[in-house]
Image (tube, coloured by chain):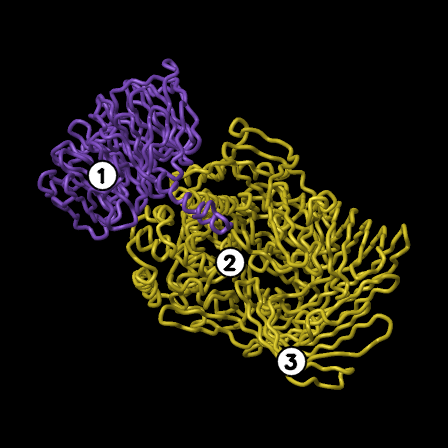
Chain colours: A purple, B yellow
């Protein structure tokens, strides 16, 4: 029996094997057995099926960074959080989990493609969609990192929508697909008539109608139960941004800068506000007000009923992400690296924070943590100074 | 003229490196820093703008354009630039040519560039405010493109090792910086109607050409129109998705290159083929006067019963003034002034500055000569240059026009402010009068036959803000400017008929630039004179000039070249033309004023004191079986203007710990390029094993330290003096057992270099190159070394036709004295066929003679999975002779042979030679034939 490794060759092999195990260990994704739901959870893009980007939580500035998480790659979707576990997908193809309390990584799982849109949490499962491959929609059990099901939707660059027992996904191949969240089977599929009508706008729902925009410049309302198209409205230009549903209205912006309010039942236009720039991101809405950022760096607050301008705020660069409404405050990030806190009633700037890099992902709130994603691959947790 | 001037303003961003960078190289032309710029910095929200005080107003306008472009582009790209962008402005192209931001020469047609090592943008003005704004926008698109693509790759954790295809990079830069104009339309119309349009799938065939730029712009227009404007942004954002850009196209617009070509080609045919029912290609309806090369700016002159046309042409690579005899059917062009080979006629501005001939037969033309442009007067009857006029305060001079009595000349000129104004020079009194004095771009003056009026083109109407030029009349007696045309189109190049009753000019009012005429002297233009169309070309006409028999001469664009044409009875055509337009002058005296950032809009202005950044930082470890292991690092840094460069090199050759301290090799150099006299100095300490190429048996260890100082003074673009002094303490230990040699060496050298050669794809084809060096090396402490050096190297290239040449080289290298070093030769550089560096001696001569000729223009191989094409394969037949010796001459060796050369990628030449070696004083052919492969340019 050998007492040791005698040659450098053997030592090298041993090191390589050890390293392989270490790497394999790191890539595992194992979180605790249950993820208890809570009222402060932020489990999908926009905070809920209507994507209003509104939170009931109160987090008053000034805020101070308490930890910073390095995702090791670009992140274009917002973090989602439940039971103090933060989950996010990365553009280099990983689903990662971290502890919101301290920012420490709980694990990660390498997946097959770039996760462009925000994943959605369903119990201990994360459902996410990927770009660049056919088998693109995946439900994964966060307790063991194993895939529960996979659905071939083609490349997807939007955020899946979870409502009751269904997952709704829009694809670059131009379909809205309803998938059974338990089995991963297709319930129905709606494909607009327009040829090559890519869809990168994430779907939203009020429970009755699923709404989304398309690259060809239409906004669709599709019956949630049957998949039948209820209405189709020409927006005048491509729609990259996701619609939100505020009360009985669909609010969505176009690449040519028009912010439209449509009747959620009929699709008829109620008002249009021309921002004079491009709209790449979703709006936010609460208490009869709509807050929409545009590429000229302007955040405009509008009366949700009339589309009348309430106030404007000008950031230092493009606003490429949806603002966040939280208890009388608006948090909005810009490519100028700054997160601004504004008075929702007046638009007055109350506070600002300079991030590591450009902000092109909406901030989310969980408890008294504000999770801010910024280039280059960071999520920063901010908490009110008053409680630190 | 605007359109013509911008035709070759290829806003190249990358890689226009020249072959002939001057300073500190063996041969090469010189980039002369004639002008002492007092640089200042204007800081705006996103830019550091470098300018000199004379052009302050231009810089402030540029600052406004840059900030406006930035605001627009960050929205289009959904991206911003993380760091401040250095913008370096020059007020003229001649100043721009002196920049050290890039080491290469800047050709006449380059309108600006983006250098992405340090993210610097360098832009000159050419007198046109709108064009200045356009180039700023264009280059900033490049800045955003590079940053966006890097961001996309970084986000997906992909290596930043690839770039977008050039057709898209340049196409989108044009698409997002300017409108689809007459010039772009001209190129595309011609490409489709003359059947040389290149499909996207085959775009590599025209890589880097102006045609590719314009096709790229058209493709971007087409993508935006057919598939949606947002697709251009998505092409950037999807760049990470595939290695092949054809596949990126597929995932973005649903079409691969080949599928896209089907749509695009069909669209182009539908768009342009109908033009042929109403318009003509110039060659079909005109007299062809000159058919080859690129030709422009015709001017008619008759004397001694001869009718001649003088013009600026380029047949061989050098731009010159030519003339043809119009009485001949197919006249051969004759060189009148050979340009671009001498200090006097250093460079023409072939698409900017016209020629003029006085009533006495004095040809006035402009060239660059030294720091600025000069006005030359050439006496045609005497066939000699009568005068060269230099102006102290004028930088760029353009388009002279004679007064009818031949005593005065009007011309346009740009001074250091960057404004282009009109001047009149009285040749008798030498008075220089400035006719206009504002930022409007006043150009193409034409003196009327009665001497009372000067017609000119200018962007001074409100339409000038979008780049439109109109025609004006300056009335001398009243000191008044009158509108001749008024509209959002462009009206250029006015020319008077001989009797002064009609003015011909070009206009793009109907979508293509054609010749139009308008009567003069029959009433006020503002009362509604009608202009009438004279030509109806589908492509373009330029520079009309009247003959004395009613014939109208002009340049036209067809088959992607500019040729000279004429039409007869121009005045009769005017009378019969049914296409006319009457102007409505509703200007109310309004003019336009461009925005400028000044006062509170800028962060501040500062004198430039040097802003140094790292260029290269690299470490390396190398292992060599003879020289052992060495490790080290190199650093290079320079200032933002590229005027001061610092190099640091450190490495260690120690083979054991005890040698560590004494085995450090350190060199530090500073090179200063900011002034006309370039200089470099540095210190060094070298220690290690050496192998003397001059003596194959000499393997030794040497420890040396010292310093050097070198300078280079350019006498002109073509000639320079070089000097060098080196002081070196050398401690040499030869391994063959000789005693150690210590010396304190002082080396001095002085050289004269002359180079006006013109290069083809594999080497020089025209001109001359000469280098003469005298040097002396001595050991001032121990007297161990003392020798002098003479080097004479002359190369001559006799042009044979367009692409052939007979090249000759005469070299003499000589070291004489104590411990004189040996030179060596053999191999593809000099004595071909002989073993590389096998012939050594303290004296050496070699002469080579080579016939260079085109061999294969294109060689294509098509495989089932794709094709590959090789172009410009050249042939050569050569003979080399030479000998080397120390004390006594040994023998003359030589070789005879033939070979082929091929250029790869513009910077690498593969040569293959076969031949016979000759020995014994050129009396005996060796047995067998030699074969040699080599990568390197022809001598």
B507 shown above or below B681: below
Residue B484 x/y as whole percent: 48, 50
Left or right: residue A202 compared with residue B651: left
The answer for how far apart the CA atoms under marks 3 and 1 are is: 72 Å
Q: Nearer the viewer, residue A245 or A235?
A: A245
Mark 1, secondary structure of its residue = loop
Residue B828 x/y as whole percent: 66, 71
Q: Residue at x 31, y 46 (%)?
A: A113
Would residue A261 be seen by someone viewing this image from the given angle?
no
Residue named by callout 1? A160
Residue B817 x/y as whole percent: 88, 63
Mark 2, secondary structure of its residue = strand
Left or right: residue A76 compared with residue B336: left
Q: Residue at x 28, y 32 (%)?
A: A31
Mark 3, secondary structure of its residue = strand
Mark 2 and mark 3 lie on one chain; the one further toward the N terminus is 2
Residue named by callout 2? B503
The answer for how far apart the CA atoms under marks 1 and 2 are is: 69 Å
Numbered disc 1: what chain?
Answer: A
Q: Nearer the viewer, residue B309 or A167?
A: A167
Q: Give the number of the disc on residue B897.
A: 3
Q: Nearer the viewer, residue B88 or B557?
A: B88
Quadrant (top left, top right, bottom left, bottom right) of the C terminus of chain B: bottom right
């Amino acid at each position: 029996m050998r007492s040791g490794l005698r040659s450098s060759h053997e030592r090298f092999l041993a090191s390589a094997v050890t390293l392989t195990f270490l790497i394999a260990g790191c890539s595992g994704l194992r979180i605790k057995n249950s993820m208890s739901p809570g009222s402060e959870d932020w489990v999908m893009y926009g905070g809920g099926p209507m994507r209003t980007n509104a939170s009931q939580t109160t987090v008053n500035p000034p805020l101070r960074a308490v930890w910073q998480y390095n995702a090791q790659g670009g992140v274009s979707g917002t973090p989602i959080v439940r039971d103090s576990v933060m989950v996010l997908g990365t553009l280099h193809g990983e689903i990662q989990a971290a502890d919101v309390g301290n920012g420490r990584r709980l694990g990660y799982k390498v997946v097959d493609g770039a996760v462009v849109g925000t994943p959605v949490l369903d119990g201990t499962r994360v459902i996410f969609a990927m770009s660049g491959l056919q088998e693109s929609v995946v439900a994964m059990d966060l307790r063991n990192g194993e895939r529960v099901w996979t659905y071939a939707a083609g490349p997807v660059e939007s955020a899946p929508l979870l409502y009751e027992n269904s997952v709704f996904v829009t694809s670059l191949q131009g379909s809205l697909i309803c998938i059974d969240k338990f089995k991963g089977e297709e319930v129905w599929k709606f494909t607009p008539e327009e040829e090559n009508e890519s869809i990168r706008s994430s779907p939203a729902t009020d429970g009755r109608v699923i709404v989304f925009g398309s690259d060809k410049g239409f906004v669709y309302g599709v019956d949630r139960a049957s998949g039948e198209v209820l209405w189709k409205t020409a927006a005048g230009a491509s729609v990259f941004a996701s619609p939100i549903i505020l009360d009985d209205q669909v609010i969505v912006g176009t690449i040519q800068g028009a912010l439209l309010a449509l009747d959620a039942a009929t699709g008829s236009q109620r008002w249009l506000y021309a921002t004079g720039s491009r709209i790449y991101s979703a709006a936010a809405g609460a208490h009869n007000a709509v807050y929409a950022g545009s590429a000229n760096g302007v955040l405009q607050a509008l009366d949700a009923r009339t589309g009348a301008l309430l106030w404007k705020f000008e950031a230092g660069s493009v606003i490429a992400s949806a603002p966040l409404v939280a208890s009388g405050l608006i948090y909005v990030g810009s490519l100028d690296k700054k997160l601004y806190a504004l008075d929702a009633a007046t638009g007055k700037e109350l506070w600002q924070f300079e991030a590591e890099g450009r902000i092109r992902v909406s901030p989310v709130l969980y408890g008294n943590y504000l999770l801010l994603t910024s280039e280059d691959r960071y999520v920063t947790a901010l908490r009110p100074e008053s409680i630190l | 003229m605007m359109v013509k001037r911008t035709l070759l303003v290829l806003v190249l961003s990358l890689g226009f490196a020249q072959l002939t960078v001057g300073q500190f190289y063996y041969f090469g032309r010189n980039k002369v820093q004639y002008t002492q710029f007092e640089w200042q910095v204007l800081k705006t929200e996103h830019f550091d703008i470098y300018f000199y005080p004379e052009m302050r107003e231009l810089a402030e306008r540029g600052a406004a354009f840059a900030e406006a472009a930035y605001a627009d582009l960050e929205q289009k790209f959904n991206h911003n630039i993380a760091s401040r962008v250095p913008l370096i402005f020059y007020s003229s192209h001649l100043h721009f040519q002196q920049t050290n931001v890039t080491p290469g020469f800047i050709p006449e047609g380059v309108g600006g560039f983006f250098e992405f090592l340090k993210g610097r943008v360098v832009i000159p003005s050419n007198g046109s405010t709108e064009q200045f704004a356009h180039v700023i926008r264009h280059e900033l698109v490049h800045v955003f493109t590079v940053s966006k693509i890097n961001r996309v790759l970084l986000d997906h954790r992909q290596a930043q090792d690839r770039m977008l295809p050039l057709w898209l990079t340049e196409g989108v830069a044009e698409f997002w910086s300017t409108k689809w104009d007459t010039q772009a339309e001209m190129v595309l119309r011609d490409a489709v109607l003359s059947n040389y349009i290149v499909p996207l799938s085959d775009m590599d065939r025209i890589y880097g050409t102006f045609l590719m730029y314009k096709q790229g712009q058209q493709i971007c227009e087409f993508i935006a129109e057919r598939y949606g404007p947002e697709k251009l942004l998505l092409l950037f954002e999807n760049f990470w998705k595939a290695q092949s850009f054809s596949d990126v196209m597929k995932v973005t617009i649903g079409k691969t290159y080949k599928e896209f070509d089907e749509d695009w080609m069909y669209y182009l045919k539908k768009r342009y083929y109908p033009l042929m029912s109403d318009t003509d290609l110039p060659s079909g309806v005109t007299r062809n006067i000159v058919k080859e090369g690129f030709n422009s700016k015709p001017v008619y002159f008759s004397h001694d019963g001869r009718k001649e046309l003088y013009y600026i042409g380029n047949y061989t690579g050098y731009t010159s003034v030519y003339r043809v005899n119009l009485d001949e059917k197919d006249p051969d062009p004759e060189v009148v002034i050979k340009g671009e080979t001498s200090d006097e006629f250093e460079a023409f501005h072939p698409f900017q500055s016209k020629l003029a001939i006085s009533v006495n037969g004095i040809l006035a033309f402009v060239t660059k000569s030294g720091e600025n442009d000069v006005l030359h007067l050439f006496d045609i009857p005497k066939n000699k240059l009568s005068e060269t006029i230099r102006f102290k305060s004028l930088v760029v001079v353009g388009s002279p026009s004679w007064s009818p009595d031949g005593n005065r000349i009007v011309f346009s000129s740009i001074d250091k402010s960057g404004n282009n104004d009109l001047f009149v020079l009285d040749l008798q009194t030498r008075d220089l009068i400035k006719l206009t004095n504002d930022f409007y771009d006043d150009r193409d003056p034409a003196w009327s036959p009665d001497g009372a009026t000067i017609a000119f083109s200018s962007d001074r109407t409100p339409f000038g803000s979008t780049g439109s030029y109109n025609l004006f009349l300056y009335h001398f007696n009243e000191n008044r400017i009158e509108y001749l045309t008024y509209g959002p189109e462009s009206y250029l190049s006015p020319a008077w008929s001989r009797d002064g009753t009609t003015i011909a000019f070009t206009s793009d009012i109907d979508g293509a630039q054609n010749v139009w005429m308008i009567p003069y002297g029959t009433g006020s233009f503002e009362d509604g004179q009608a202009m009438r169309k004279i030509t109806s070309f589908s492509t373009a006409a330029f520079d009309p000039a009247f003959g004395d028999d009613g014939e109208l001469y002009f340049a036209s664009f067809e088959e992607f070249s500019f040729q000279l044409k004429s039409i007869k009875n121009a005045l009769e055509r005017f009378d019969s033309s049914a296409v006319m337009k009457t102007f409505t002058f509703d200007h109310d005296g309004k003019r336009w004023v461009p925005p400028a950032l000044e006062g509170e809009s800028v962060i501040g202005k500062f004198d430039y004191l040097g802003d140094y950044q790292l260029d290269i930082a690299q470490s390396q470890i190398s292992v060599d079986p003879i020289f052992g292991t060495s490790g080290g690092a190199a650093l290079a840094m320079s200032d933002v203007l590229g005027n001061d460069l610092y190099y640091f090199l450190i490495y260690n050759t120690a083979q054991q710990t005890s040698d560590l301290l004494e085995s450090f090799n350190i060199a530090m150099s500073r090179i200063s390029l900011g002034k006309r006299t370039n200089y470099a100095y540095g210190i060094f300490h070298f220690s290690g094993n050496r192998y003397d190429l001059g003596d194959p048996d000499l393997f030794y260890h040497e420890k040396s330290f010292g310093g050097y100082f070198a300078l280079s003074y350019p006498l002109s673009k073509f000639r320079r003096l070089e000097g060098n002094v080196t002081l070196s303490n050398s401690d040499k230990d030869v391994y063959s057992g000789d005693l150690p040699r210590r010396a304190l060496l002082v080396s001095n050298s002085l050289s004269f270099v002359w180079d006006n050669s013109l290069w083809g794809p594999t080497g020089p084809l025209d001109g001359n190159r000469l280098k003469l060096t005298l040097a002396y090396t001595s050991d001032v402490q121990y007297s161990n070394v003392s020798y002098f050096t003479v080097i004479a190297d002359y190369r001559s290239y006799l042009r044979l036709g367009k692409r052939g040449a007979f090249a000759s080289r005469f070299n003499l290298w000589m070291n004489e004295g104590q411990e004189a070093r040996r030179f060596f030769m053999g191999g593809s550089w000099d004595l071909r066929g002989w073993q590389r560096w096998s012939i050594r001696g303290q004296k050496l001569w070699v002469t080579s003679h080579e016939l260079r000729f085109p061999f294969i223009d294109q060689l294509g191989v098509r495989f089932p999975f794709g094709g590959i094409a090789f172009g410009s394969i050249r042939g050569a037949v050569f003979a080399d002779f030479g000998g080397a010796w120390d004390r006594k001459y040994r023998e003359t060796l030589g070789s005879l042979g033939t070979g082929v050369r091929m250029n790869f990628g513009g910077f690498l030449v593969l040569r293959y030679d076969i031949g016979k070696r000759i020995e014994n004083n050129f009396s005996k052919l060796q047995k067998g034939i030699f074969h040699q492969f080599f990568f390197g340019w022809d001598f």
